[in-house]
Amino acid sequence: MDLHKIAVKFFAEDPLGVKAEELIPVFHRWIQKHTVEGTLIDVADYSHVPGGPGVVLVGFETDLGLDEMEGPLGLLLTRKQPLPGAFPERVAGTLKAALDACAKLEEEPELKGRLRFRKGEALFISNDRLLAPNTDAAFEALKAGLEAAGREVFPKGVSIVREGGDPRRRLAARLVGSP
């Protein structure tokens, strides 16, 4: 399966440690200083929406945000443009980019010590319902690629577990690295 529209999320250790709107000045600074890869465009504040997308750093290739839509508070990185390489390479690259953003957020002066991410576990989300619907067959088609990507990011091993089977939701899987 040649899936390009993908997202990954790393969950916050303490979801109450920081409020999403605290990222607004941080993300504006990231735009000014080109802190993360890609063309960064704007910051969108949806923090007033319960269980919503929080605060989003909008980019041409990638969106990045502190999100509560896909489970508890965490950093969600969404790829919007095609990436080079095979599916496992694209997923591994997306996981690494999200981990890099997590590390940078943890070091921001306004957030230091109050925002930490669980880096041994990630949520993978297919953002293409046509190519990868939330079915057993689509999950099985992606599973080997997710395992290969997971081994690159979690070298001690990884387990892949499908998240929910509701066909109305996007296909998602949890990648959990071995300790």
Image: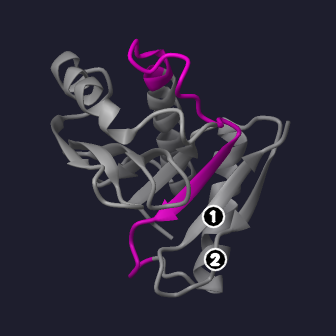
Which region of the structure is painted magenta? 104-131
The reply to whether discs 2 and 1 touch (Cβ–Cβ < 8 Å) is: no
Q: Nearer the viewer, residue 114 or 81?
A: 114
What residue appears at the point 62 percent right and 48 percent down from the top-left corner? Answer: 122
Q: Would you identify the image quadrant in which residue 26 lies? A: top left
* SS at mark 2 in the image: loop
The majority secondary structure of the magenta stretch comes to loop
Q: Nearer the viewer, residue 51 or 154?
A: 51
Residue 71 in percent (x, y) is at 55, 59
Q: Would you identify the image quadrant in which residue 127 lies? A: bottom left
What residue appears at the point 57 percent right and 52 percent down from the top-left corner? Answer: 88
Position of residue 66 in the picture relative to residue 177 (left or right): left
What residue appears at the point 45 percent right and 66 percent down from the top-left corner? Answer: 2
For label 1, the residue is 173
In the rendered structure, which amino acid carries the disc numbered 1? Ala
Residue 120 in percent (x, y) is at 71, 39
Q: Quadrant of the C terminus?
A: top right
Q: CA distance from mark 2 to mark 1?
A: 8 Å
Q: Would you identify the image quadrant in which residue 136 lies? A: bottom right
Dot 2 or dot 1: first in sequence order is 2
Q: Residues within 10 Å of mark 2 (few under 14, many from 20)?
A: few
* SS at mark 1 in the image: strand
Q: Nearer the viewer, residue 49 or 62?
A: 49
In the rendered structure, which amino acid carries the disc numbered 2? Gly
Q: Which mark is residue 164?
A: 2
Where is 140 relative to 149, above or below? below
Q: Which mark is residue 140?
A: none
Where is 51 relative to 40, above or below? below
